[in-house]
């Protein structure tokens, strides 16, 4: 087995671009992995045995909404310093508005739409139409595939109506989807944590060893880094202060917002941004902004049998839809009477304070020094634990010995539903492979193969067709 020589560290879901601050040879952990590790047996199935699960419908909806917001904020970032129209209209959700599409004689490759000239909602439509049967069944609670697409369009349009189509008024968007690496340090000494991890040589390089690794493996010592991807980074136009913007989706944004102080994601983002803030500006990293968006279907305004607009106070349609209904009725031949218009405007004002906050929740904040210090210690403790667990995957002499190193936590029906590995975890048996194979043969229970952290050899690295990209976008 050759000596371990890495020329690039590639983490799953971070292989599309360079990660700022990540060394050529490093061990990485993410907040997703830290969440999985609340039960060590669950981590063993997910990250040790590399068993992936299909995302739920709420997660898929959130991923689609995230892609739409990424397109919106990328447009605002690209137009902030150019003589270009910063407005992102509802048509832009369907047709890509990048100026390069209209540049005569210009060889252009649009990174946003891949030269399809489709906006984000249209791209999502094209994606789901490739497997309509699957998405019809998945989107049952929305009323089918078309209703799912309409809910995404409505939520995106409402976001623009709520916060403005020209981007944040007092802020510039200076980064979108920014991947960064934060070194895991010992807070007492400031040294980056280094530990032994098992790796396997492949034709392309090296990869992490897995559960009961069948290929020859060796231990190498690597520094640990947390990797993260910031949804967007904003800079105040006057003070030059930097803020991390994070998108979240939830069925109930207001209740979700009440528990944001329990989230341990943002402190790490701010620490990573602070260590790399010179990449984006010279201002200080000040705090965070949460944008929580409702994943529920938005209600339509009620129209009475008489053709009048309902002013029933219990309705929960967003104010912008109600406003559009008023404008549509006023544009009709008979229009609206003065009394009806007055009542409708009162209803419109009510909806802005009752319905809108339940669909969109924005929160600003700045974690204190104690919170950041605690995060540093917790990150170090998790890295030490993960290093030990990585070694336990391969050093135990028997399969039972490996399983014994990952005790179960009796909390199998945690928030969000049952653990996806509960079946194989409770089934037990002499062979984990046999148990997993039997579950894969059952309908709607198959697992997918997770990708592993890999380190490319020099020759593999040099053959990669990589285009230089700006570290900001």
Image (cartoon, rainbow, N blue to C red):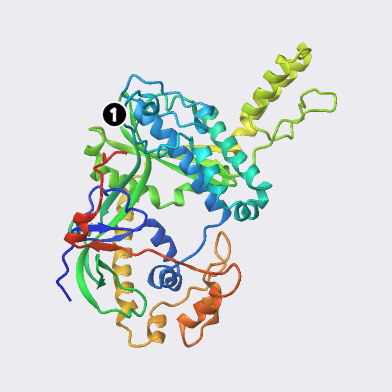
Q: Does 183 appear above or below 470?
A: below
Q: Residue furthest front?
A: 105
How far from the left and from the top, in percent, is residue 221? 19, 69
How far from the left and from the top, in percent, is residue 224? 25, 61
Q: Residues within 10 Å of mark 1 (few under 14, many from 20)?
A: some
Q: Residue at (37%, 76%) from the top-left corner?
A: 211
Is 95 left, or right, of 137 in this rendering?
left
How far from the left and from the top, in percent, is residue 358? 60, 38
Question: Which element type, helix, strand or loop, lies under badge 1?
Answer: loop
| Residue 257 seen in render | no
Is 310 left, or right, of 78 in this rendering?
right
Q: Does 185 appear above or below 335?
A: below
Is 216 left, or right, of 55 in this rendering?
left
How far from the left and from the top, in percent, is residue 77? 36, 31
Looking at the rendered image, the quarter that the N terminus falls into is bottom left
Residue nearest the observer in this picture, 365 or 361: 361
Residue nearest the observer in this picture, 285 or 164: 164
| Residue 222 seen in render | yes
Please name the residue that numbered disc 1 is placed on: 240
Quadrant hosting residue 226: bottom left
Q: Does 121 appear above or below 23?
A: above
């Amino acid at each position: 087995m050759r000596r371990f020589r890495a020329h690039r560290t590639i983490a799953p879901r971070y292989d599309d671009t360079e990660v700022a601050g990540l060394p050529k040879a490093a061990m990485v952990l993410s907040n997703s992995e830290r969440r999985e590790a609340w039960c060590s047996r669950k981590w063993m199935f997910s990250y040790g045995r590399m068993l992936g699960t299909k995302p739920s419908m709420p997660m898929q909806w959130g991923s689609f909404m995230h892609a739409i917001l990424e397109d919106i904020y990328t447009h605002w970032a690209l137009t902030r310093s150019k003589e270009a129209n910063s407005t992102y209209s509802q048509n832009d959700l369907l047709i890509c508005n990048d100026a390069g599409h209209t540049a005569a004689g210009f060889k252009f490759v649009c990174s946003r739409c891949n030269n399809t000239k489709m906006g984000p909602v249209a791209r999502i439509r094209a994606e789901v139409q490739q497997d309509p049967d699957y998405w019809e069944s998945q989107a049952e609670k929305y009323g089918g595939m078309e209703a799912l697409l309409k809910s995404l369009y409505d939520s995106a349009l409402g976001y623009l109506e709520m916060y403005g189509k020209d981007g944040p008024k007092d802020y510039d968007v200076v980064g979108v989807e920014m991947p960064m690496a934060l070194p895991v340090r010992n807070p007492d000494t400031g040294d980056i944590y280094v530990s032994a991890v098992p790796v396997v040589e492949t034709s392309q390089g090296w990869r992490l060893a897995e559960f009961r690794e069948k290929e020859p493996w060796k231990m190498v010592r690597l520094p640990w880094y947390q990797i993260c991807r910031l949804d967007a980074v904003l800079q105040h136009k006057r003070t030059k202060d930097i803020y991390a913007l994070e998108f979240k989706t939830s069925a109930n944004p207001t209740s979700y917002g009440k528990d944001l102080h329990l989230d341990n994601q943002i402190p790490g983002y701010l620490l990573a941004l602070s260590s790399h803030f010179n990449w984006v500006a010279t201002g200080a990293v000040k705090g965070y902004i949460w944008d929580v968006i409702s994943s529920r279907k938005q209600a339509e305004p009620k129209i009475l049998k008489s053709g009048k607009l309902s002013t029933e106070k219990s309705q929960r349609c967003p104010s912008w839809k109600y406003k559009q209904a008023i404008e549509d009725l006023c544009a009709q031949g008979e229009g609206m009477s003065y009394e009806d218009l007055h009542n409708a405007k009162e209803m419109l004002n009510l909806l802005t304070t009752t319905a809108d906050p339940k669909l969109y929740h924005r929160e600003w904040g700045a974690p204190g020094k104690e919170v950041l210090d605690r995060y540093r210690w917790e990150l170090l403790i998790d890295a030490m634990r993960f290093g030990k667990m990585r070694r336990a995957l391969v050093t135990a002499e028997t399969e039972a010995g490996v399983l014994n190193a990952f005790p179960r936590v009796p909390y199998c029906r945690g928030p969000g539903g049952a653990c996806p590995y509960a079946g194989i975890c409770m089934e037990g048996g002499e062979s984990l492979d046999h148990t997993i194979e039997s579950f894969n043969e059952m309908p709607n229970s198959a697992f997918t193969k997770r990708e592993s952290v890999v380190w490319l050899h020099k020759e593999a690295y040099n053959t990669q067709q990589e285009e230089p990209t700006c570290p900001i976008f």
